[in-house]
Amino acid sequence: MEVQRITVKYVAKCNLVLVLVVVAFYLNVVRSESQQKIEMYRKSVSVWLREVNMDLSDFNSVAASLTWKLATAPDETTSNRAMELGVVRNKWKNKVCDSRVRKYWLAPNASRMMYLLCRGPRFSEELSRSYMDIMGRLAQNYNSEICFNRSDSEMLRALNISGQCVYGEPDLEWLIKRTDLSAEQLKWIWTTWHNFVGPKIGSLYPVAVKLQNMAAQGNGYNSMAEVWQEELEISNLESKVFKLYDQIKPLYMLLHAVVRHKLFQKYGSTIVDPKGPIPIHLLGNMWGQDWSQLINLFDFGTMKVNLETNLMQKNWTVIDMVLRAEDMYTSLGLPKMTEKFWKYSKFQENSNMSVCHGTAANLYERDDFRMLLCAKVTMEDFYIVDHEMGHIEYYMAYQNQPAIFQDGSSSAFHESIGDAIMNGVMVPQHLYRLGLITDDQLFNTGLGDFLLLQQALSKIPELPYSLIIDKYRWDIFKGRIVQENYNKEFWDLNYKIRGVSPPETRGEKYFDAGAKFHVPDNTPYIRYFLAGFLQVDMFNSLCKLAVCGKNGDGNMSNYCPYIPLHLCDIYGSKKSGKKLEEMMSFGSSQPWTETLQILTGKTYITADPLLQYYQPMYKWLNNYINLHKIPVGW
């Protein structure tokens, strides 16, 4: 009944918009725009925006509740209610944003509220219904089961797959991580998923693009690409992200060369060209964006530690992982997870769930924050728990802001918090605290290099991947990539920027980009690219606060003893947590440049802390390449 309630409330309150119209008309009659009249106008706007925020809070709460139900126990009734709510919400937003507000008279706070609320695409009722329908079909196709034919029986037995049906996420995604499988088995897993889901998504995707561009153009943008880029509030975004990538490209090239060499040694030249792109199905990840599963290809002797095995030997449950993640945050003075979090979160897969992608949910009710994921006791899922908990800490920090400001300073900020904290989890001291390494391993001077390589394998490949996913979609929105060349252009970008190739020739009947959740879900991805830099910069500042009790620009050694960033233990630093919480508490109430300055002292995104963090690994990779005369590039 929530949708009916909010619809009635919306109709009753629509006339509030007239307040501004009447006030604006009155002030137009009076030619003298004195400060007194401006103050009167600002007070009227403030009263009106208070009502707008109350309405938006109601919309957010009902929408979040319906979204949660669709993810955990979907049914047609809930789906229809969500669509109706979306239509009503769009009507409300259009009505609010059509009000004749004198923008140059607004107070800065009110001006930002109007900007945040009214930017983005503008959907008419018809366009809104069409868009939500196509998005529902895309989600249904992505989350549907793959059922096999008898011809697949031998492979199913070899892979120990029980039953005739699996899901792409998490079932096939888990399988492709297995480094004990043959290249042929890994190819089968990769092609099974991409051949199944890609064409289904590809048949609908051009329609979704057209509808989004129509909505963007309805609000004065040239395409949806401009909408996505504007959200980050970075002028010349495309140029700047490529400049950032150019700074870390040498590191990626070295990592790529060494990983290719290791795969060449394992599979031979018939499968891996020692001078060419890496076959994507061999990288231990369905999308080739995380290479951490390949750590076992490297021989570090006594420095090597198998965190996965150690984690299993601890006999942790998934709940134990959540509790250990919470302990890291609370050690910094950040709040515990709430009673509702523990009551409603879903940590493991069940038959009713339609979504297995790790998600942190803000229900927009007091202290109602939840986590949804299909977790197992693995280091990767421990990372996901830490990452999603970072979102929840952010939700808690800004929940006292007006509804319009209850968001991250930018989407890139939201993706940075959990990963910044995870950098603190992955230092030897904290792994020892968790019982994942022994006394001897803790005091092994080479352990830091091993852990840093594991971090590099996990984090560095994500940067070019996240860059191409949105470069690709920006160009589709702009019409630079046409439907007839969707797949060719996707793999051309993969070759050029990432140096990876598909396991077989891929024609235009496939839409391989659609095999990634964020594409059919229509979630922008460049936020993860920027977060890759922000998270290390934030961690750098948290480290300075933990070690020195203060923060500032420049080399840490200028004002306190130098500690290699990848070895910095921030656990228990209340000063770090206090400054982080202060930054998060502003929500989206001010531009991200001002928010970032609170923690890092900077107003820009820089590659310097990331390069500092991985400097020991850069040297190690370079020495390894020179020693073994490994070719670099493709």
Image (tube, helix red, strand yellow):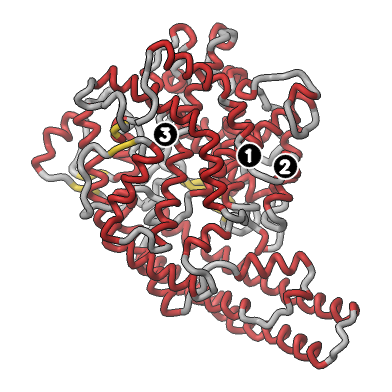
Q: Quadrant of residue 432 in the image?
A: top right
Q: CA separation, marks 2 and 3?
A: 29 Å
From the viewer's perspective, is 180 left or right of 90? left
Residues marked 1 and 2 touching at CB (< 8 Å): yes
Q: What type is the residue that disc 3 sits on?
A: Asp
Q: Which residue is mark 2?
A: 602
Callout 2: SS = loop
Res. 38 visible in picture:
yes
Disc 3 designates what residue?
Answer: 290
Q: Helix, strand or loop at disc 1?
A: loop
Q: Secondary structure at mark 3?
A: loop
Looking at the picture, how far across and down is residue 92, in whole percent? 57, 77
Between tags 1 and 3, which lies in front? 1
First in sequence: mark 2 or mark 3?
Answer: 3
The image quarter in which residue 540 lies: top right
Q: Quadrant of residue 421?
A: top right
